[in-house]
Image (tube, rainbow, N blue to C red):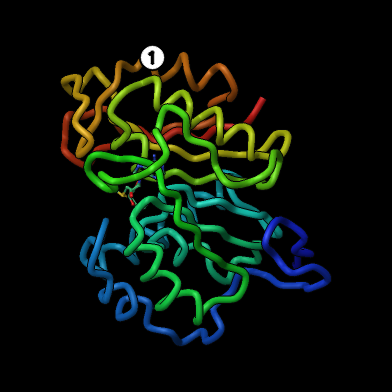
Amino acid sequence: MTERLTGPGRSTNIFLMLRSKNPSTDWREVFSKATHGHAPPAQEAIDASRAEGREFLDHGIVFPGAEVLDLGCGNGRQLFGLLDKGLGSYVGADPVRESIDFCDSHIFPLVEGARFIHLDVLNEFYNPKGKMLPEQVVLPFPDRSFDSVIAGSVFTHLGNIEVCSRQLGEIARVLKPRGKSFSSWFRNPPNPLSSDRMRSVFREGDIREIVAERFDIFHSRGGAKAEFHDQWCLFSQKR
Ligand SMILES: C[S@@+](CC[C@H](N)C(=O)[O-])C[C@H]1O[C@@H](n2cnc3c(N)ncnc32)[C@H](O)[C@@H]1O
């Protein structure tokens, strides 16, 4: 399945799909070179990415030909599980300049159909000198640009629910009608509330309210225990 890439900054009249240029690339070795931002142990990162990629396909978050935005892509971890599945294209965006530089120099040359963008939004933990205020964030894409937006472990660092609401509004804006979104959260209960940018926790009712303004949740998992990594994962569709 192929997709004609006609969106902003993309070449026209080129038929591409998201795939690795060399199927024997050792992604563990590539990812282990990441030095900034979110850089978990490489094998763990790749295994989790592949499991998530399968789950995204199973639940229709991504599908053949889909144009995908990975918002808060970090060092491109979630791209690995999306490669060679027939998706149309992938854009990774993140506030950590060094992570985008890493993706541009280490991942971009090895993949067709992917590109990376620095999003200079303030985050006290990840990008303390960011120029754009998170409560006024504007994603650098036109309305209805993507079929799917993945935001894995991003709302868990946004500090307050107003910023989350703004981010969801932007995700909805750049999604095509009935577009799909994946997001993960720390909810209260069971976790104690926190506005820490390293681990933000919001009331479950508040999360449901801001999500329901624009999305229907069609699947969820996790987030039942107050364990450090147990995130509440929401699979949703733009209304
Ligand atoms: C825990 S990492 C997750 C990275 C990646 N999604 C993954 O699953 O491997 C959180 C990411 O969110 C990014 N981030 C922080 N604030 C953001 C914002 N306002 N918009 C988009 N991304 C943001 C950080 O720079 C960081 O790369």
Q: Residues within 10 Å of mark 1 (few under 14, many from 20)?
A: some
The image shows residue 95, relative to residue 43, as above or below, that is: above
Direction from residue 4 to residue 195 in the image, left or right: left
Please state, as top left, top right, bottom left or bottom right, where the N terminus lies in the image: bottom right
* Residue at x-position 41% and y-position 48%: 120
- x and y, in percent, of residue 188 in the image: 25, 19
Label 1 beta carbon less than 8 Å to ligand 1 = no
Amino acid tagged 1 = Asp
**Numbered disc total:** 1
Task: Determine the residue located farthest toward the right in the rendered image.
Answer: 13
In the picture, residue 191 is in which quadrant?
top left
* Residue at x-position 38% and y-position 50%: 95
The image shows residue 185, relative to residue 21, as above or below, that is: above
* Residue at x-position 39% and y-position 33%: 133
In front of the other: 28 or 131? 131
Q: Secondary structure at mark 1?
A: helix
The image shows residue 83, relative to residue 7, as above or below, that is: below
- x and y, in percent, of residue 69 in the image: 55, 51
Residue under label 1: 206
Please state, as top left, top right, bottom left or bottom right, where the C terminus lies in the image: top right
* Residue at x-position 37% and y-position 77%: 27
In the picture, residue 160 is in which quadrant?
top left
The image shows residue 105, relative to residue 82, as above or below, that is: below
- x and y, in percent, of residue 192 in the image: 16, 20
- x and y, in percent, of residue 66 in the image: 67, 55
